[in-house]
Amino acid sequence: MRRSHRRGRRLVALATAVVTLPLTATLSQAAAAPPAPDPAPYALVPQPVSQQAVAGAGFTLTPQTRIAVLSRDSAAVGVGTYLAQLLGPATGYNLAVVKDDRAPKNAIVLDPDGPKSLGDEGYTLTSDERGVVVRAHGAQGLFRGVQTLRQLLPAAVESPTRQSRAWTVSPAKISDSPRYEYRGVMLDVARRFYPVAQVKRYIDEAAAYKINTLHLHLTDDQGWRIAIEGMPELTSIGASTQSGFTGGRDWYYSAADYKEIVSYATSRFMTVVPEIDGPGHTEAALASVPGLNCDDKAKAPYSGFDVGISLYCLEDAAHIGNTRRFLAKVIKEVAKLTPGPYIHLGGDETPDASPEEYAAYVKAATSATTGRDKTVMGWHQLGQSGVPANSLLQYWGEDEDRESIGTAEETKSIREVRQGVAQGAKFVMSPSDHAYLDMKYEVATPYGLSWSGYVSVQRAYEWDPTTSTAKPDGTGSVVPAERIAGVEAALWADRAYEGSNGLPTPDTRWPAPQDYADYMSFPRLPALAEVGWSPRSAHDWNSFRQRLAQQGPRWTAAGIGYYAAHGIPWPGVVKTVPGAHSVETGGKALDNPGGSTTDGTAPVLWSPNRGPNQTWTFAPQPDGSYTMTNKSSGKCAEATGAAGGAVVQRTCDNQTGQRWKITPGDNDQYTIASAATGLLVTAASAANGAMVTQQPDTGSALQHWSID
């Protein structure tokens, strides 16, 4: 589920090999861009199913505004109280929450008695100068509607301190419901411990984007983070380490702490899924309970960064019994503390486990789980063994797996998914090359890793759960659409420090867990949230990037230290063409393959990484044109020949063939035309290795470039 060196994954190439395409490739091969949906009237994330602008000035809050709940139901009243507490700090208003039998005027009305057709999480919202009405079929739908309501207010409403301004809700008419029932985020508290307050903060941040599940990775090699009654050594020994840290005394959640997290999540209509990983990722347990080891001797507590280093002893009946009793005790206690339906049993990355050993673990863990009336959840590897029907498996594969589907060389992951499907399992989709928040955004990202490639915001957004286990052309999905329960973003903490490409040193800077979480999650978590919530027909990158940009001021007001990702038109950021940029179209970047320093090398498209291969410095010339110099080679882009001629790099000579006219267009994109030929720089396709030529202007999407 996590790392290339755990399973022999290939790193996504940083364009170190030249891909040769036939010189006959022309515009006819360019992928046509899908038609964009109508522009959204409001910058809402996730995009609602339906939204309409309403004429008028909108509803302005005053200190006398009431929040009227048309119910005596305590959960619905709780949503009203939540809203009042949400609005209070920035407005300075102590808004009254009242129970009412009918909708008053000049109020925010919360009505939980809407039609059953809205479902558990659907809602409607109407706003005009007379007031706001959020209607749902229950309190949970009201809560989701409130998250939309806050985005119809000025961004400053997210501030924790009083702001002096008018507080007007934009006039709107919205109808909304989720695409998927399960929309989760996973927090790795095992490798890097998050105190309770920081977990609660992250719950609030995720709930704002209609995330409804918090998956806590509670145990791993580097730490055991939940107290188990009658087994104090699991926390006195197993919780004494983190990745890079030793000597901890309170790096775990007591039963009271865990209940506090669960209660807080419940108040945000979020289900907590505890993960007790096994049979690998168990070094903390092996350091705490000697009988889980084959020699009956406890391991040393582990604070390193290696993986694939541990396994419960499952070699003989006696030790299988030890593991079975251990899991029964742990799962019993965790189940007692967890009102949600799932217990996550891990199951991934066990290279040293024989099929018999793995099956022994799965049998013991699933029996303990179903015996407590909980539904089995686990990584997709659990599918290789016997799991109960309706288990929930979490798929974390990537391009390599999709490319193998339907071939004689299908990867082990795909075979395991097939086995899970055959056993009646459902699936949560967390493809690592789209949904792993610990993957670097680009080469320069200070934290995380890149074994599944660089996951830009666009890559986090542009995928579809129904094709996560399909061939690259979208056909032949291994998991039927009706078996997909939802999506989950995963924030691992393997390398949650600066300079994460190498191991830490005494001088390494470690951000606070919440700072790491903010930087790696925002803006990508809202992208994943829209994948899980909004209808597929509403997904459009250009629309999303414009709406996402307007979330930036909200995060600033709230104190969320987000990454101002390239390619997003963040307000207040003035972009100028002169200087060093990544040049991208179709989600791919103009790349000098292999960092070649040879004259005549033709740039190609490649997955963005913002490395020197993909960095082009634009220098203005007296005639208003620019030269484009590649950082890795120091050579200039040059036009060759007429229509269909390649763009190559050559030693800079400032001749006309090396000058380019940059013309702005829609959506912060540009055309790049040769000053010598007047032809546009054009990509043959949006595939890795696609050649770049000069072509007449046809309006193709692959003639429009972002210069970020």
Image (cartoon, helix red, strand yellow):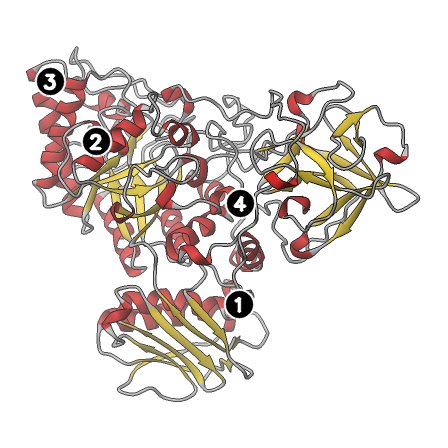
Residue 626 placement (x, y as % from top left) = 83, 41
Kindly state the secondary structure of the residue where label 4 is placed: helix
State the residue position of label 4: 458
Amino acid type shown at disc 1: Tyr
Q: CA distance from mark 4 to mark 2?
A: 32 Å
The percent position of residue 299, horizontal first and vertical second, equals 25, 16
- The percent coordinates of residue 298 (x first, y second) are 21, 17
The numbered dot on residue 468 is none
Q: Which numbered circle lies on residue 319?
A: 3
Q: Residues within 10 Å of mark 1 (few under 14, many from 20)?
A: some
Amino acid on which the number 2 mark rests in the picture: Gln
Q: Nearer the viewer, mark 1 or mark 2?
A: 2
Kindly identify which residue carries mark 2: 419
- For disc 1, the marked residue is 42
Query: SS of the residue at dot 1?
Result: loop
Give the spatial CA distance, label 1 vs label 2.
44 Å
Residue at the spot 50% in from the left edge and 29% down from the top edge: 450
Q: Earlier in the sequence, mark 3 or mark 2?
A: 3
Relative depth, front residue between 302 and 618: 618
- The C terminus - image quarter: top right
